[in-house]
Every structure is written in C-alpha cells, then in structure tokens.
Image (cartoon, grey):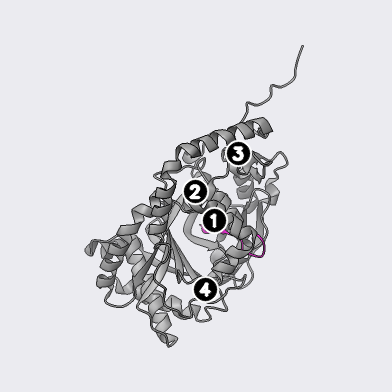
Amino acid sequence: MNTSRPLPAAAVIDRAGPADVAMLAMGTGDSLPQRAGAVLVLEPGPGFEVAQAEALLGEWLRSVPRLRRRLVRVPLGCGRPVWVDDPRFDVRLHVRELTCPAPGDQRALLDVAATVLTGPLPPSRWTAVFVTGLKGGAVALIVVMDHVLADGIGGLALLAALADPDRRPAPAGYPHPPPSLPRLAADAFAERLRALGRAGTYWRDARTALAAAGGIRPAPIAPCSLLRPTGRRRTFAVVRADLAVVRSAAHRHGCTVNDALLTAITGALGRLLERRGEHVDAVSVSVPVSARSTTTSGDLGNHFGVLIAALPVTGGPGQRMARIASILAERKKAAAQASAAGPFGPLFRALAALGLYRRYLRRQRRIHTLVSNVRGPDRPLTVAGAAVREIIPVAVAENGNVTVSFEILSYAGTVAITVIADPAGVPDLDELVAILNDELAGLRL
C-alpha cells in the first residue's frame, strides 16, 4: 500500500510588485534601510507572561503566509523577485524579548525601537520584540517590517490580523514548494504581454505621477537648515492629540483631519526655522497617498503614490488649513491613481545600483520633509489578552538630506505623531515637539 503523502498544490506565485522592487533597491549599499513599524504599549493583566505571548504569536503566524516567506531573486527572464515559503523558518529568529534600559520611560523605549529598526532583520524581513522593564509594569511589543514586505496600510492590516482572531484567515498548507523555472518564465512572459497591452497608458501614468509630485521641473524650494546630509542614527519623539478635537477643528473649516495635521506640522517647522534665525513662506512636503480601497493581511506589498506640495507656514491656522486643503485636493487623486514606481521603477533601480540615487537624495532640493498618515483601528485591540494602551508609529528610511520627518497613526480616539529626526541635524528636537504641541492646541481656536 502506498503511504506517501501527496505533494501540496502549487502555490500562487507571490511576486514582488514594481514599488516593492523600487523599495528594495533604495535600501541597498550604505543606505539606511527602508523600514516601518509600530510600538504597541500593552497593559498586561494578571497571569500575562511574555513567553506565553511569544508562543501565541508563533501560532498566529500560521495564518499570515507572507510572514514565513523570504524574497528570492530569479534567473534572468523570469521576472521580478518572488516570495517563497521558507522551509527553515524559525520563529525564534523573529520573535524575541529585550529588557528596556533604566529608567524604562518612553524615551528609553523609543531608543530601543530606533535600535531595532536600524538593526539586522531575519530572512523574512520582519521582527517582533517584546520589551519588558518599563515603568508601571507595562510591556511593549515592537513590530518592524522591511518596506519591501508591506507599506503602512498593509502593515496595519498585519497588526490587526495578529491582534484580532476574526481578521485572521485559516492557516494554509506549509511549506509549498517554490515555483519551477518554467512556471516563473511563463508568468513573467504573461506579465510582459499584459504590460504591452497597457503601453498606451504608460505615458499617461507617468505624466500623472509627475504632476502629483510637482512636475519634472518644480519651482525651487527655499534653502534652509532642514536640509543637510543625514547619518544613520535616528531619534524619535511623540506628540499626541485627541482625534475628536482635531476632526472638529478640521470640519469647522471644511477640511479633513489630514489637512489639519499638516497645518500643525508645517506651522511648527516654520516657527522652528524662525527660532533658528531663518524665514520661509512655505515648506515642501512629500505625502504618500494610498492606492488601496481596502486591504487584508493577504494583500501586502506597496500600493501608494506620492504627492509633493509647497504648503504655507504663515497666517492663521484656519486660513492656512483652507489653503493647504485646496493645494492638496488638486494632487491627491493623481497620486492615488499613478505610482511613480511603475513608469520610473527601472530608472530608480538603475540609479540605486550605480549609487546615484543616494547621491541625489543627499543633494535634492524638492522636499523639506515627509509626512505619512495612516488611519488605525477605532476600537481598542488586545494582544495575548493584554489591552493595547497606545500604538506609536515608527519608521526609518534613507532620506538623504531631509533631517526630520513625521509618521502619524490614529488609534482608539488618539492621534500619535512620531517625529523622526537625525540627531545631528535636529539638535533642538525637544523645542520642535513643544512647538508642535502648541500648533495642535492652536487648531482649536
């Protein structure tokens, strides 16, 4: 009698998208890796044990196939890299525990997060670190992902799936064998045929992406101390605001929450420059715009466009908010419709391979800062039975000469704005935080 087990069915080819490959290229060489993540501050109840939480996390991973895969390059002619199941996957390489250095406060926790974000990642390009030793008996969970794995929205879907059993799909068979070379070649050929069918839209998409980014020759931005070559270190600080208050202030002027937050951030940067003895009328901001309508933990990768706009820093908050809303409205739709990674992805990769992309970033005069805003869960989450008190967004990237950027995440009625700074370029980070708090309070007027 034949007792051999049947081979699992051939898995769908999980190929990296054009934007994923562009992200991969941007983080090569001496560049700072492109990574995003979150710090979940937990309130452990009686009986909570980190070891048990780690074991539960390991079980949940079976429901998210991408987290047990590694990205592999394929032979010439077989298309972009593919994600394949890693038969040697070891959860112990990805999930671990650290003790926060004294005094165990937020500053110490954020320093730990910065170290994890800039450190090495396992082959699956993500890690989850439980941090103990925090004040008040809290425990933090730092989740970090390489940007090639997921963008902000996709990463949030992963967090939701890990924290909410109802959002986790049923575990799938594992491991599937990698796709054969004939399958990869056939899939790549079919993709090229589809691309030829879309050739008529190529230049239209290119023009749309360029328009959202301010055109091929945008007006030069004001030179200021926000622009200087950055190093590999990053420092984080967090500013919080009541989401209902921000929403009320925005709606009072016919604007969105994002418009209001950009008003506060750009106003704070303008005031910081004034304190440094500099004056600008506008700050040029790069804002990623999601091209997703919905997402799940099975739909990862990068799906976003980028808009770049010069936003005013002078005038009253309401007046500036209305102007900012008007400026952004013209470009949001274009940015969501066309990502530059499709039309210009090969150019990005070629420049990165030659080391020219990083050189450009260190000399660019197109943006002063980057601001990413992701809407998080409206209701509180739990992880292994522990309530998630707050979620702090974190990220690092090779920003070239951009010394400060902002990650925004709303969660359970609170907006967390993480200020990400190059410590040499922003020695007055505490002052910026104080000004930003003041600008947020000014939105209520």
Crowdedness of circle 1 by 10 Å Cα count: few (<14), some, many (20+)? many
CA gap, disc 4 to disc 2?
26 Å
> Of tags 1 and 3, which is closer to the observer?
3
CA gap, disc 2 to disc 1?
27 Å
Q: Amino acid at mark 3?
A: Arg
| Numbered badge on residue 62 | 3
User: Pointer 3 and pointer 4: residues touching (CB < 8 Å)?
Assistant: no
Marked residue nearer the N-terminal end (4 or 2): 2
Q: Amino acid at mark 4?
A: Thr
CA gap, disc 4 to disc 1?
36 Å
Residue at the image point whose x is 57% and y is 41% from the top: 64
Q: Secondary structure at mark 2?
A: helix
Q: To which residue does mark 1 refer?
A: 44
Residue 209, compared with residue 253, is above or below; it is above
Residue 118 coordinates in the image, percent (x, y): 63, 63
Q: Amino acid at mark 2?
A: Gly
Q: To which residue does mark 4 refer?
A: 403
Marked residue nearer the N-terminal end (1 or 3): 1
Q: To which residue does mark 2 refer?
A: 154
